[in-house]
Image (spheres, helix red, strand yellow):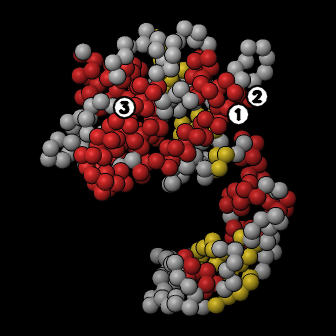
Amino acid sequence: MAVSTSVKKRMGTGMGTSGDGTMNDGDTYEKWRAVAAATGPADRAAAEAGIRLAYEATGLPAPERVLWADSPLAGVELVAGLADRGRPVREEVRTLPWAEERRRLHDALGPAGWTAHWQATGARLWDPTRALAERIRAGVLEALEDRQGPGALTGAAGRELLYDAVLGQQDAAWLAAFDGHGDRLAGLAAVAEQAGWWWPYEKAAVVCERPVALHRDEAGRLDRGDGPALVHRDGFALHAWRGMPVTAGFLAELTDLTPERIREEENAELRRVMLEYYGYERYLEESGARPEGRDETGVLWRIELADDEDVVMVEVVNSTPEPDGTHRTYWLRVPPGTRTAREGVAWTFGLGAEVYEPLVQT
């Protein structure tokens, strides 16, 4: 089948940098890290070819129709309206091939080899992609809970349909582990390189476009302080601060924060977000906080918060001057039980205060 050959080439079997023509683990990780973070319109022809190949690999006939949606929310609503979609085939298309390929590769590499390979590829992508997938799932269900009126898709029905979905680009972690080790998963990989979530059924497949914008922090968590962290072109959006779900209204309020407003916030997690946004140093200065103690390593500060653990910071001054001759001040967050600045600085190095003896202070 001509489409199978073209998609296999696009998947990358036989391409790469190592001597046997396959990609090394570092290159594979970078490739799939980029896939997981990709935004913008899909190459729909390539994605649909991947869907046909994924069905073909399991002996299933290609779906009669491939329908596109602008977001996971629109996708689950579109699926709900397809009366003639046939039975779900996620088990055959995604679950069983993944399990069999994992077993094959594990046997080929051996336990130690498989562990090393997974740590260099999929493990590095697992937490951020899983967290994003769960956040999207929760966002879809939250949107469905707000729907009213006769015939509206309910949250319970939507939850069941979400179990039928393949995660597309958010399956990057495990696809990275199998890239270059055979072509049975080439179809799934080709869809993931171009699209978001998709629903495989016997007679039809529904595929979501990737987001138009995706903002994440260095740990891969959704993160944006001045707008939605994830946006799809139909308006489906998620707001987050360093991975924590927040509302658009909460983010808008951050620009007008005061120490009093921070103290009044009853939700401890939201209060922490406010403190991070406002700045611990600024909060200490404007709230009239006093140092709890000082020694040769720095100054210990404590912020007491109602119904939450204390925020304890150590103020340290870099002994190495900046180019202009000034010395930069840093604020180190330390455990709430810290009682001296020395103990706090030692904790950041994984040491006890009694054994912390820096040879050179930098």
Disc ID at residue 272: none
> Given the image, on which type of amino acid does mark 1 rest?
Glu
Cα separation between marks 1 and 2:
7 Å
Residue 188: quarter of image: top left
Disc ID at residue 142: 1
Task: Name which residue lies at 80% across and 67% down.
Answer: 305
Do the residues bearing badges 3 and 1 touch, measured as CB atoms within 8 Å?
A: no
Residue on which the image places disc 2: 146
Tell me: residue 160, above or below residue 36.
above
Tell me: residue 61, above or below residue 129.
above
Of mark 2 and mark 3, the one earlier in the sequence is 3
User: Of residues 233 and 166, which is closer to you in this image?
Assistant: 166
> Given the image, on which type of amino acid does mark 2 rest?
Asp
Estimate the x, y position of residue 111 in percent, counting from the top left. 31, 54
Residue on which the image places disc 3: 97
Can residue 319 be seen here? The reply is yes
Instruction: For marks 3 and 1, give the one nearer the viewer.
Output: 3
Can residue 38 be seen here? The reply is no
Task: Name which residue lies at 55% across and 39% down.
Answer: 133
User: Of residues 312 and 276, which is closer to you in this image?
Assistant: 312
> Given the image, on which type of amino acid does mark 3 rest?
Pro
Badge 2: how crowded within 10 Å, few (<14), some, or many (20+)? few
Estimate the x, y position of residue 56 in percent, counting from the top left. 33, 19
